[in-house]
Image (tube, rainbow, N blue to C red):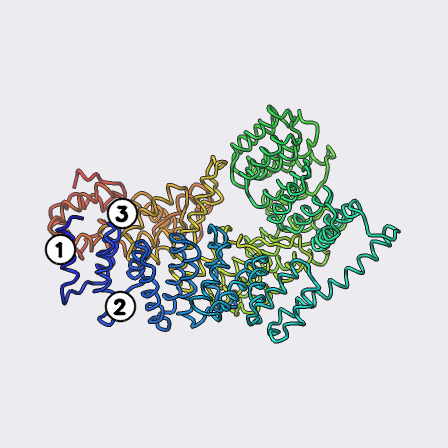
Amino acid sequence: MDEDQRTTIKSYLTQEGTEIPTVDKSILLKYLSGKKEYDMVEIMAKFHLFDNEGHFLETCTVNNVRIYFEVLIQTKKLDKLIEAASRYISQFSISKQGSSVYMINYLFVRLYQQIPPEDALYIWSKLVRVYYGHCELNSMEIYGPILSHLYHFFKFGKDSHSCILPLLKRVQHEDGIVPASHLASTLITFFSSSRWLSEVNRMWDWKVVRDLPIVASDLTAIMRSNCHFHDWDTVIHLHQKYSLAQDDYQQFDYLLIALAKKQDWDKLKNQFDSLFGIGELPTVNHYGVIMYALSMHGELELVERLYGQLLRRDMTPSYAVLLSLINAHYKVGDYNGVLREFSQFKRYDIRPTSATYLLLLKAYKKMGSLDSCFKILKSMSSESIPLYETHFKIIIELCGKFDNYPVAEELFNIMATDYFIQPTGLTVSALIKTYLKSKQYKKAWQLIKKHEKSVKVDRFKIIQQKIMYYILTGDVKKSEEELKVYFQQKYKLDSNFYMVLLQHLITGRRDHVAAEKVLEGMIKTNLSILKPDHFNVILEEYNRIGYLEGISNAISKLVDNQIPMNSRTLYFLVKSRFELTRKRRESPEFLIGWLEEILESIAKNKLNFTTRTIHPSVVTWPMNYVSRNDDPSKAVDLFTKYVKLFFPRSRDWNDKLTVLRALLILSAESGKWEDFDLLFASYREKLNFYQKQPSAVVRNKHTEAAFVGLFGYKIQRMRQLNEINLLPSLIKELEDSGYTLSNDEWNEAIWRTIKRRSTFDFAMKKINDIFIRGYSWIHRARSLRKGQNGQHIIDKSSGSSKNSSRSHLYLKSENYRLIMLQIDKYLRYNSEQLEAEVKRLIDQYPYVMKQYLRKPRTGVVNWDYIEQNHSSYLHKLRGTHVLISSEEF
């Protein structure tokens, strides 16, 4: 910007009586900031964000104030920033609480990205004191919206932890001992919630050394920390010493745990003495044997307790001890714990084995991390750890989860050529399964024919997948024949065979009665191989057809026979209960409490469940239901409970797409649109991350519908922000990435875009290319379906897959009428060039205009002229269903 331009703008901004509309003000601020004309932004703020007394104008927007604050950050005018931000927060802390909290969080994030962490945290503490009147934030439930932003700062910020003690000293010196004590308590609360327990101890020591007041949240956190580190004596001592701070029910829980643990150690010694018949404590080998036996039964707490005792006796863990730790975490579904404990091998300089890496691969498979699996293969090769077929089988099966058959295929070939491992039915069946999941039926059949007779080991696994091939390709007769051959050859009737048999009965024959008889037979004769997944085959079918009573009966049968549930089973149970509530038009409040009790029982290992973790869909489906049909705050409570129970030490729930989807719906239904914007960006970023993984060589079809059910909210948000003009480009980005939208979402997008001149042609093109044809087909089908007596006469053709795909996307009847009127409105604005515009529309959008011109458009100015001058064309068009070329117009 040259000097003349700056002078002109400055004169305009400072001229008395100049009033800039809010939208223009935002545009100008963004422009000046983008040009780095920071002094001009400050001038504009002085005259157009503040009044004569230095207070912010009531009409100022968050975005405009944010631009001003950003300039102060960029120019390092921190004192001025603190003064202005404090004024904003104090001025709007009551009338605009949300914007005040948002501004504190926004400034903190921007500050720690730009300035030293100590300064950023110091400014944050001052702004928090302005908002609350103090900085003693001792509850994550109450102060979570502000405290949660500390997590990223301490996890990723360089020197963020080392700056704490200098910061507390600075606060004590500049602001006083009370604010410093309050800040220390705040950090204790945050670190305790985030499971940074060593930092809890550090903050505690800082307060104790200075003889500062100990509040209830401090005592709770330090007791929790010492419980975590199994320092039971200290827990008991602290509870007795700080009696004035005993104002939290959790403290008594920790005290009970400590007392119970102290008792258990004595009992454990007696058990060990009697077990081995010796008068001294066990050796490390004894520990290894006992711990591994416990880990096989998923007794994680017992394993960790023995491990802690072993370390306190200054014993060095053995391979069996470390393997037991990993196995125990895997058995309870703590896959991050598997990875964490694996690092102990390096710490104690113990060489992992093939079995160790196998557990690691299984954990990564459960977590869905394909690229991590390849890193494991690389590590095993570099460390000369033997690779076996089982290792490859796990990764090949994981490829099926992402439709990534090329990588599975290549891995299968590498196994044979580079590692000289001859495929057996184990890996051949795994690759067939991956092909089938990816709908590569031709490749699956070729692999079956190639190895069906040549493979000797585990051939029955290939035959099982052959039956699945027939089931999935709809050849019920062939699958029946192959099942007879399977029985005749007396192949192994293992757990997976019964899965295939149930799929044949449910997917192929749609015979759930026969499927239930198979389950009853397994209960009587093969209970040991019966798994919840066998029930899930039937439950999925009952869920599809809405047979709620069948779901209840099947799960009752599972529970009565003491078969553990898994997440899929629980999902069907929860969904059926909520659907029943919907059907009865009852409040879901009771069900929320019921579900919370189930979650707590799973987390505390009080329920017969396969793991101590659950798939997030068990919680997100009810969250979506409650958000849309009841009170969104109840969904928040449910989600908070879920996070507390299953993610007490981390924020790994952030990485789960199903959780992000639920939070998107929750934020939209709650009207928290700024949260929605952030979550939507995170959701897209996460999807892009998966698509750009090195192993993602093909598109994952399972994520195609990732935006279905969400895009309607996005359109609503874009309407609020007056950004409908950006909708076509967003849709194009999603389409280019392979994502689909529902018909309702498409109809909403078309309706919103056709109403604007700037996006009119986008909507017309979509209608012409896809939606008008679907509309026409459906209406023709409806007219044909009913004969003179109302009997359906084209049932077979209407059910064909071809017709189904044609009618999948169509213009809804109510939208069709509105869109025709919108075209009228569009042409009214082009009345001076009416003839040319009609011809252009006929030329570019012939299918739409064929419908539009079927009757006179009385709502368009000068339409009589069109009817008179083009009567021949219109008469011909209205007398036929065939397209008439625009050249005849």
Percent of width and height locating residue 877: 22, 44
Would residue 546 be found to the left or right of residue 133 on screen?
right
Disc 2 residue type?
A: Thr
Gap between marks 2 and 1, in whole Å? 25 Å
Gap between marks 1 and 3, in whole Å? 44 Å
Which residue appears at 17% of the width and 38% of the height? 887
Disc 3 residue type?
A: Met
Percent of width and height locating residue 698: 47, 36
Q: Neighbour class for label 3 at 10 Å: few (<14), some, many (≥20)?
A: many
| Nearest to N terminus: mark 2 or mark 3 | 2
Percent of width and height locating residue 251: 63, 69
Taking depth in this image into account, of 592 and 150 the one nearest to the observer is: 150
Instruction: Decide if residue 537 is in sight here.
Output: no
Taking depth in this image into account, of 561 and 384 the one nearest to the observer is: 384
Gap between marks 2 and 3, in whole Å? 39 Å
**Label 2: which secondary element:** loop
Disc 1 residue type?
A: Thr
| Nearest to N terminus: mark 2 or mark 1 | 1
Q: Which mark is residue 764?
A: 3
Q: What residue would you read off at disc 2? A: 59
Would residue 517 be found to the left or right of residue 624 on screen?
right
Residue 841, image quadrant: top left
Q: Which mark is residue 8?
A: 1
Q: Nearer the viewer, mark 1 or mark 3?
A: 1
Q: Quadrant of the C terminus?
A: top left
Confirm or deny contact between disc 1 and disc 3 (CB under 8 A): no
Taking depth in this image into account, of 11 and 654 the one nearest to the observer is: 11
Percent of width and height locating residue 639: 53, 61
Would residue 186 be found to the left or right of residue 519 on screen?
left
Confirm or deny contact between disc 2 and disc 3 (CB under 8 A): no
Q: Neighbour class for label 1 at 10 Å: few (<14), some, many (≥20)?
A: few
Number of numbered discs: 3
